[in-house]
Image (tube, rainbow, N blue to C red):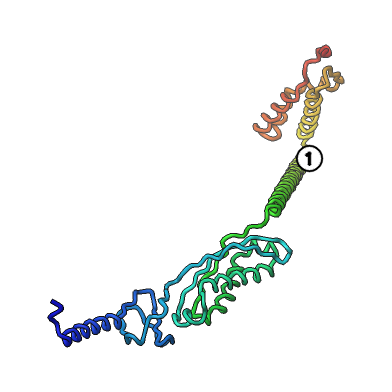
Amino acid sequence: MFYDLSGFDVFVIVLVLLVILTLFAGVKTVPQGFDWTIERFGKFTRTLPPGLNLIIPYFDRVGRKVNMMEQVIEIPEQEVITKDNATVTVDGVAFYQVFDAAKASYEVADLNQAIVVLTMTNIRSVMGSMDLDAVLSHRDEINVRLLEVVDAAVSPWGLKVNRIEIKDIAPPADLVEAMGRQMKAERVKRAEILQAEGQRQSEILRAEGAKQSQILQAEGRREAAFRDAEARERSAEAEARATQMVSEAIAKGDVAALNYFIADKYIKAFGQLAESPNQKVIMLPVEAMSMLGSLAGIGEIAKATFGESAASSAQAAARRGSVPPTTPVPPAR
């Protein structure tokens, strides 16, 4: 069948195929998240954004297909000597994003390798300027300092380093053992301090309690003494008032009042003598016995002098002041 085609027909067919291939070669579809660079005769001319794009076939060609999404790159493990000559093993990760595809393609030969080497170098620089304790306890500060330095260094490459994280900091085994002993000693020290502090507080509280107890007891004794003095003062005033009344009655010639006063004192004295715990035998004078015989008349005297109630009080006082039996009591064994 092809043997029947003329030369013109073949030319037309070749021309059509060439046109179709040219159209396919001039249409470029860039996926989302990527930028393509276009080179003309080996020189960068422009960048194709995501979507459908047209280029000039046979003159332009796609140079680099650059990933514009944020990427993570592993920072390999390395040994770092700190300021106080301690050797630690450190690794990490870095997150970066390309914002200029042309610079990322033509300003640096191996982008990832450049970032890794740059980050490792700055890790040694930053951590080498710090003591071991600072390296182990200030990881956030190390990350911030690394980010500032590395981000400034990669900016000419059309990159933005978003984060740098130190993954692990591993001191040598002997140093870890020494740190363990130090931590144990610190904990023992804090425990002993806390125990001593608790004992001190306990002793202070006990002393405060004893002090408050003594203060309260002293206040109680003072209050009791004050009230006893007040009671004695009131009793003395009453006694003085009674004596004054009897004196006034005597001054007016009332002999019965004087007899009642003397009898009352006498009976109270006998009552106190009888209530003495060591007194088992009481010897009374003859005058006293005669006075006891007149007890029945005391009530009549009081009734005549002070009225019925006073007479009853006098008789009751006389009964309380009665003399106990005079029978000798044998001493207790």
- Label 1 crowd (10 A; few <14 / some 14-19 / many >=20): some
Give the quarter of the figure containing the N terminus. Answer: bottom left
User: Which residue is pictured at 68% across the width and 33% down the height?
Assistant: 310
Query: Which residue has dot 1 on it?
Result: 243
Secondary structure category for the residue under label 1? helix
Judged from this view, the residue extending furthest toward the front is 3
- Position in image of residue 112 (x %, y %): 51, 71
Asked where in the image residue 12 lies, by quadrant, the reply is bottom left
Up/down of 140 relative to 205, above or below: below
Up/down of 284 relative to 35, above or below: above
Q: Horizontally, is 9 left or right of 151 in the view?
A: left
Q: Horizontally, is 184 left or right of 160 in the view?
A: right
Q: Name the one closer to the observer, 70 or 279.
A: 70
Asked where in the image residue 34 lies, by quadrant, the reply is bottom left
Up/down of 234 relative to 307, above or below: below
- Position in image of residue 100 (x %, y %): 45, 81
Q: Name the one closer to the observer, 131 or 195.
A: 131
Residue 256 in sight from this viewpoint: yes
Disc 1 residue type (three-letter): Thr
Q: Name the one closer to the observer, 45 or 19.
A: 19
- Position in image of residue 315 (x %, y %): 70, 26
Residue 230 in sight from this viewpoint: no
Q: How many marks?
A: 1
Up/down of 155 relative to 206, above or below: below
